[in-house]
Amino acid sequence: MNDQIRYYQLRAKEYDTIYQKPERQKDLALIRQYLSQQFSGKELLEIACGTGYWTQVLSTSARKILATDINPAVLAIAQEKDYPQQNVEFHIQDIYQLNPADSSFEGLFGGFILSHVDRAYWEIFFIQCLAQLTAGAEFIFLDNKYVPGSSSPISRKDHHGNTYQERKLVSGEVFEVMKNFPSESDLQPALLEQVTAWEWIEWEYYWLLKCKK
Ligand SMILES: C[S@@+](CC[C@H](N)C(=O)[O-])C[C@H]1O[C@@H](n2cnc3c(N)ncnc32)[C@H](O)[C@@H]1O
């Protein structure tokens, strides 16, 4: 198990506190509202779903969601939450081993996972995500903007341009975690030629990219 996966396994029980930061509440309410409408009636693949914060939002209108993560510890928390439509199934799934034969999804959502993908791997990662989708289906990635005073400071940058943060858990254990803060133009070279529509939205603390296959 690599350090990032172990970090999220140990962070599982404290993960949802990230959604309680007071200064981010306005953005989060706007994003919940936006995402609750995005995949209405669709069968959706959610990658790296974590504790299910966005799964709950998406499940209010999606027809069906296959919510996946590599960590049983976060999936256990996600599974305990309420999904009144009973339209969510959870599976263990590595984002780097998506099933290339499965191109049946009408949408794909990834919250706060693209920032953890190595920049050198972005193009392949997007190819593999798009391969999950039917023609004309959309994917959405949501992630953080770097906001001084609210974001954890960047501790270093590697030769691919990936940035890292030192993250401390309640236990006191410290992890170095890759966390990128790409701009729209950073992402375009890896993806623009593979998609038929592109939408970029920014709030104060977050960005969202929606693309059509
Ligand atoms: C920042 S959390 C985001 C969780 C959730 N999407 C959210 O927005 O609240 C990142 C998640 O990615 C998962 N993860 C990390 N590496 C992964 C991999 N290789 N395959 C699948 N999930 C992974 C972690 O277990 C963690 O739940």
Image (cartoon, helix red, strand yellow):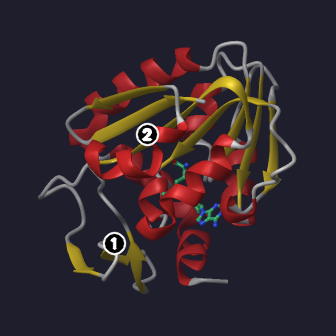
Q: Secondary structure at mark 1?
A: loop
Q: CA distance from mark 2 to mark 1?
A: 20 Å
**Which quadrant would residue 67 be assigned to in this image?**
top right
Label 1 is placed on what type of residue? Asn
Residue 88 at x, y = what percent?
79, 33
Residue at 53 percent across and 76 percent down: it is: 4
Is residue 49 something one can see in this rendering? no
Ligand 1 - quadrant of the structure image: bottom right
Q: Quadrant of residue 93?
A: bottom right
Q: Is residue 10 above or below residue 101?
A: below
Left or right, 191 with respect to 2, comes to: left
Residue indicated by mark 1? 162
Give the label, 2 or 1, closer to the camera: 2
Pointer 2 residue: 192
How far from the left and from the top, in percent, is residue 132? Answer: 74, 41
Q: Nearer the viewer, residue 95 or 135?
A: 135
Looking at this rendering, what residue extends furthest in the front direction?
193
Q: As rendered, which of 116 and 75 lies closer to the eye?
A: 116
Mark 2 C-beta closer than 8 Å to ligand 1: no
The dot on residue 33 is none
Task: Determine whether, in the image, residue 43 is placed left or right of residue 26.
Answer: right
Q: Is residue 109 left or right of residue 106?
A: left
Q: Residue at x 30, y 34 (%)?
A: 25
For the C terminus, give its image quadrant: top right
Q: Is residue 76 above or below residue 39?
A: below
Q: Determine whether label 2 and label 1 are within 8 Å by CB.
A: no
Q: Please determine whether, in this image, residue 62 is positioned above or below residue 102.
A: above
